[in-house]
């Protein structure tokens, strides 16, 4: 009888430990996701709204940073933060002083953060861009970046013209 009570008690304790471990793990994952999102939004605001590329790279870019946008890396996939920093600085320098981004949403899961924004390029008519940026972080620093850019308000017809639906078998709305 006493053995059964001990076995049940051990089983209950094991179950409580497992549940609390899962809860702790989920909370840690949520906190990591939240922190990574804040890092990415701070990086983008520093670059595109404060126009301070050097500060952004010093505070938010990690070792081994990989830029996948050919305009910003020279060669996509290059592991050279200094080259990317110079390209970002040139990009921002070419913009109007009042150019800025308005962030509409972010989506994050652990080390991946995606943002959607509208880049208002300083009041030049028809020059606003819709931008989706995707970042990968490691130890709280941005180590990888991809983006998709199109003129603001452009229809999704580009997906259809480029060879059909974005997802095989899916029908895009007209």
Image: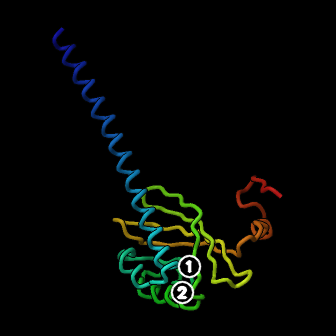
Image-quadrant location for residue 167: bottom right
Instruction: Indicate the position of residue 49 as horizontal and vertical percent values.
Output: 52, 78
For the C terminus, the quadrant is: bottom right
Image-quadrant location for residue 146: bottom right
Bin the neighbour count of mark 1 within 10 Å (Cα to Cα): few under 14, some 14-19, many 20 and up.
some
**Residue 77 shows up from this direction:** no
Residue under label 1: 69
Q: Nearer the viewer, mark 2 or mark 1?
A: 2
Q: Reply above or below: 171 against 9.
A: below
Instruction: Indicate the position of residue 126 as horizontal and vertical percent values.
Output: 74, 80
Disc on the earlier residue, 2 or 1: 1
Instruction: Indicate the position of residue 40 as horizontal and vertical percent values.
Output: 46, 68
How far apart marks 2 and 1 lie (CA) works out to 15 Å
Q: Reply above or below: 152 against 166.
A: below
Q: Is residue 108 left or right of residue 20?
A: right
Choose between 171 and 148: the one closer to the eye. 148
Taking the spot 17% from the left edge, 14% from the top edge, the residue there is 3
Residue under label 2: 92
Bin the neighbour count of mark 2 within 10 Å (Cα to Cα): few under 14, some 14-19, many 20 and up.
many
Choose between 168 and 135: the one closer to the eye. 135
Query: Is label 1 in a helix, a strand or a loop?
Result: loop
Taking the spot 41% from the left edge, 85% from the top edge, the residue there is 54
Q: Reply above or below: 78 against 152.
A: below
């Amino acid at each position: 009888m006493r053995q059964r009570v001990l076995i049940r008690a051990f089983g209950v304790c094991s179950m409580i430990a497992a549940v609390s471990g899962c809860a702790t793990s989920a909370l840690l994952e949520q906190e990591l996701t939240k922190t990574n999102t804040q890092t990415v939004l701070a990086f983008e605001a520093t670059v595109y709204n404060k126009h301070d590329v050097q500060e952004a790279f010093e505070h938010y870019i990690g070792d081994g940073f990989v830029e996948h946008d050919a305009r910003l890396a020279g060669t996509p996939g290059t592991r050279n933060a200094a080259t990317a920093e110079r390209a970002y600085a040139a990009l921002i320098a070419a913009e109007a002083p009042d150019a800025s981004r308005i962030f509409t949403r972010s989506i994050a899961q652990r080390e991946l953060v995606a943002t959607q924004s509208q880049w208002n390029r300083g009041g030049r008519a028809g020059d606003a861009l819709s931008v989706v940026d995707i970042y990968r972080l490691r130890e709280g620093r941005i180590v990888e970046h991809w983006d998709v850019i199109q003129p603001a308000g452009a229809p999704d017809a580009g997906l259809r013209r480029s060879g059909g639906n974005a997802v095989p078998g899916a029908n895009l709305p007209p």
